[in-house]
Amino acid sequence: MKDKKRAMGRGLGAILSAESKASVNSATDEGADKFVGNIMEVSLEDIDPNTTQPRTYFDEKALNDLALSIKALGVIQPITLRKDGNRFEIISGERRFRASKIAGLKSVPAYIRLVNDQELLEMALVENIQREDLDAIEIALTYQRLLEEIGMTQENLSQRVGKERSTITNSIRLLRLNPDVQNAIRSGEISAGHGRAIISIEDAEKQQELFDKIIKEKLSVRQAEQEAGFMKNPKVEVKKSKTEVPNHLKKAEKNLSDILAVKVEIKTAANGKKGKIVLDFKNEEELEQILSHFN
């Protein structure tokens, strides 16, 4: 678990000390460009709740459940604070703030907003999207900040970062995954494709079941998508399980697999007169290896 905690936010910028940047309060102050868009570790003692917070009731059980998750996995999504001198006011994330206190944390990761930093923050976040070392969750968090804090529409954001709207929508959906799954994506244990297969299932228990199966059986993204389809429509699975591959095709699959050194699947139509051969490859190197046999 410690490794997963350390991985949190690694591509969003170095974690900065609040004390070392005490003189930076406005976007016009020296050092503001290094301050905006990064994550800071802020002491809980220096944070004040927002007096205009519209939510006045916080479910105690839900807070305790969140506190247990934070204790085990850390704060997955940093809170957002407004800097006022040496103090910080919560803009968003009061549930995470309260739960962190219950969990016994001394500080939390946070994004900091400064006076007049709108343009500076937008530039920092858009530049951040272009980085190659960001994981899928970090990208999703950055998209979300551009939409919520900058107030961009998905159409504007699509044009600004040069991505299709569907790509942005699918990315942000990953933030609905539970903290365990998000951390697994961040640590590289599973891919964003696995995450999209999991989030396609509405039932939380089935999501966890699929996640556990992906980890245990090392399912590929395609296999995870098929499994998600079976979970959403069990009748399809029963029907498919009755389709047996003839022995001579099984033998052909094995022979081809031995020659090409990759997984081979032969699929035939119901009448058995036509079909297709599917070759699985995990990376560009395996693809080149397959192609070399035909060259």
Image: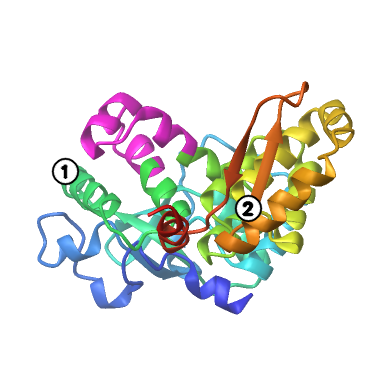
Quarter placement of the C terminus: bottom left
Residue 179 seen from this side: no
Please determine whether, in this image, residue 171 is positioned above or below residue 108.
Answer: above
Residue 167 screen position, x and y as percent = 41, 35
Q: What element carries label 1?
A: helix
Query: Is residue 213 shown left or right of residue 74?
Result: right
Residue 237 screen position, x and y as percent = 83, 33
Q: Is mark 2 on a helix, strand or loop?
A: loop
Quarter placement of the N terminus: bottom right
Residue bounds of the magenta highlight: 144-170
How many discs mark residues in the rendered view?
A: 2
**Which label's residue is closer to the chain start, 2 or 1?**
1
Residue 29 screen position, x and y as percent = 11, 61
Q: Between residues 60 and 276, which one lies in front from this camera angle? A: 276
* Residue 154 falls inside the magenta stretch: yes
Residue 220 is marked as 2
Name the residue beneath numbered marker 1: 119
- Counting other residues with Cα less than 10 Å from the Cα at mark 1, is it few (<14), some (14-19), or many (20 or more)? few
Q: Between residues 79 and 270, which one lies in front from this camera angle? A: 270
Q: Which residue is drawn at 23% across and 30% down?
A: 159
Query: Is residue 106 shown left or right of residue 264?
Result: left
Inspect the image, locate mark 1, and give the three-letter code of the amino acid beneath it: Glu
Residue at the farthest top position = 271
- Counting other residues with Cα less than 10 Å from the Cα at mark 2, is it few (<14), some (14-19), or many (20 or more)? some
Residue 276 screen position, x and y as percent = 61, 34
Q: Between residues 241 and 145, which one lies in front from this camera angle? A: 241
Q: In which quarter of the image is residue 84?
A: bottom left
Between marks 2 and 1, how big is the CA–CA gap?
41 Å
Inspect the image, locate mark 2, and give the three-letter code of the amino acid beneath it: Ser
Q: Residue at x 35, y 61 (%)?
A: 12
Q: Which residue is drawn at 24% across and 72% down?
A: 21
